[in-house]
Image (cartoon, rainbow, N blue to C red):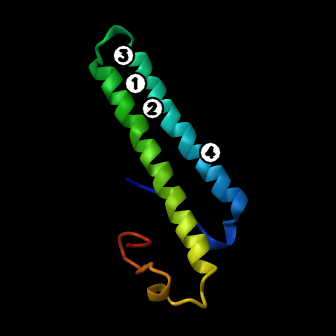
Amino acid sequence: MLVETPKLDELDQVELFTKSIRTAAHGGYVDQIINNSLQNGVITDYEAQEILKYHRKHLAARDAEIRAIIMLFFANLKRVKPQNCGLRLRASKTRVWSI
């Protein structure tokens, strides 16, 4: 799953709200596709592929939202050491954050 890495200088409450709305929209669309697919009681191969395609988009949006929240609020706690706030973040070469 590829997720856009948020840039700290671009993050604020409005951006977090936008990410939250995007996540909800993707999740709602997945539910809509499932509901429409079940109208005849059977999910076809094409419908299953569409469900999974948009489910992956929903997961990517949720992941981006969570990473942005962590990045923004963790950055605001610079004076507090990670071990004192119950969160340990470490940089990784394959991912931006490992929790």
Residue 35 sits above or below residue 20 on the image: above
The span from disc 4 to disc 3 (Cα, nearest Å) is 26 Å
Please tell me which residue is depicted at 36% across the width and 76% down the height of the picture.
93
Residue 38 sits above or below residue 77 on the image: above
The residue identified by callout 2 is 30
Mark 4 or mark 1, which is nearer the start of the sequence? 4
Mark 3 or mark 4, which is nearer the start of the sequence? 4
Instruction: Give 51 or 99, whichever is nearer the viewer.
Output: 99
The span from disc 3 to disc 2 (Cα, nearest Å) is 12 Å
Q: Where is residue 66 shown, x and y percent of the image?
A: 50, 60
Find out whether the residues at labels 4 and 3 contact each other: C-beta distance under 8 Å. no
Q: Is residue 12 left or right of residue 39?
A: right
Q: Where is residue 79 shown, x and y percent of the image?
A: 60, 91
Mark 4 or mark 2, which is nearer the start of the sequence? 4
Q: Which mark is residue 38?
A: 3
Residue 31 sits above or below residue 58 on the image: above
User: For residue 37, what is the image quadrant?
Assistant: top left
Mark 2 or mark 3, which is nearer the start of the sequence? 2
Q: Residues within 10 Å of mark 1 (few under 14, many from 20)?
A: some
Q: What's the residue type where badge 4 is placed?
A: Ile
Q: Residues within 10 Å of mark 2 (few under 14, many from 20)?
A: many
Instruction: Give 22 or 46, whichever is nearer the viewer.
Output: 22
Q: What's the residue type where badge 1 is placed?
A: Ile
The residue identified by callout 4 is 21
The span from disc 1 to disc 2 (Cα, nearest Å) is 6 Å
Find out whether the residues at labels 1 and 2 contact each other: C-beta distance under 8 Å. yes
User: For residue 48, what is the image quadrant?
Assistant: top left
Q: Residues within 10 Å of mark 3 (few under 14, many from 20)?
A: few
Q: Where is residue 64 shown, x and y percent of the image?
A: 51, 57
